[in-house]
Image (tube, rainbow, N blue to C red):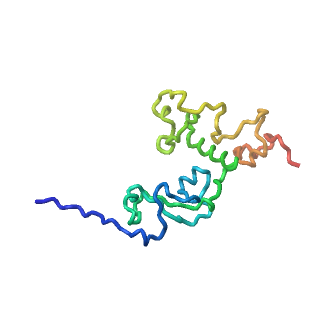
Amino acid sequence: MPRTRKNRREAVRVPRSTASLPEYDRGTVPEGLATRPALWEIGLSLGSNEGPVAILRCRLCATRPNWSCRHPTRGFLLRVDLARPKRVPTLAQELALDRALAARGTCPKCSRRYYYCLLLRTVGSCDPCAQGYEPTPGAYVHTTRRLSTGSPPEHPDGGPPRFSDAYRGRVPPSLAQDPSLHRDTCA
């Protein structure tokens, strides 16, 4: 029995004269138009560009000047004058991002911060802690202080917890009710 032939997808051919957007071959793009990656290289974002104003033809379609390019490798050209500079994150945003990445890359058992995200939901710790071996020193970030584990912070003077700590939820309510433990007096 002969093998059946797969149905090949028919190429949609649109004459270049009836294309909805102007098309340019590589190397012939006019000044003031750029693709999205080119805008990012310059340091610009899309800004108020509503959509592409022209199409950058792929290399295959450069040999077919009468047909419009419909391949997925084509590029969409945007106007450079409508692009805006990239947003620069504030220091608070950078700090929040660093804390989030630190939480994802810090092992709860050994408190080492790794350069990559750990599988804390499935494994629960870093691979050296789970497998029982010592990691190489270049695999993690050497930190000088231990990250917070959620326990109440120690006071620098070494005294008992204060009323303000109970107000913030750092001290169990049973200790907060005892007036002899309060260092601050309420007037």
Q: Residue furthest bottom?
A: 18
At 78% from the left and 40% from the top, the residue drawn is 181
Q: Residue furthest left?
A: 1
Q: Is residue 27 above or below residue 12?
A: above
Q: Locate residue 47: give its quadrant.
A: bottom right
x and y, in percent, of residue 146 in the image: 64, 34
x and y, in percent, of residue 162 in the image: 78, 42
At 49% from the left and 66% from the top, the residue drawn is 22
x and y, in percent, of residue 14 in the image: 38, 69
Relative side of 182 to 154, left or right: right
Relative side of 93 to 127, left or right: right
Nearer to us in this view, 97 or 104: 97
Q: Locate residue 45: give its quadrant.
A: bottom right
At 38% from the left and 66% from the top, the residue drawn is 66
Q: Is residue 87 above or below residue 130?
A: below
Q: Locate residue 84: give its quadrant.
A: bottom right
x and y, in percent, of residue 107 in the image: 55, 37
Nearer to us in this view, 42 or 99: 42
Q: Residue furthest right?
A: 187
Q: Is residue 170 above or below residue 22?
A: above
Quadrant holding the N terminus = bottom left
Nearer to us in this view, 143 or 78: 78
At 51% from the left and 64% from the top, the residue drawn is 54
Q: How many numbered discs, if any?
A: 0
Nearer to us in this view, 53 or 84: 53
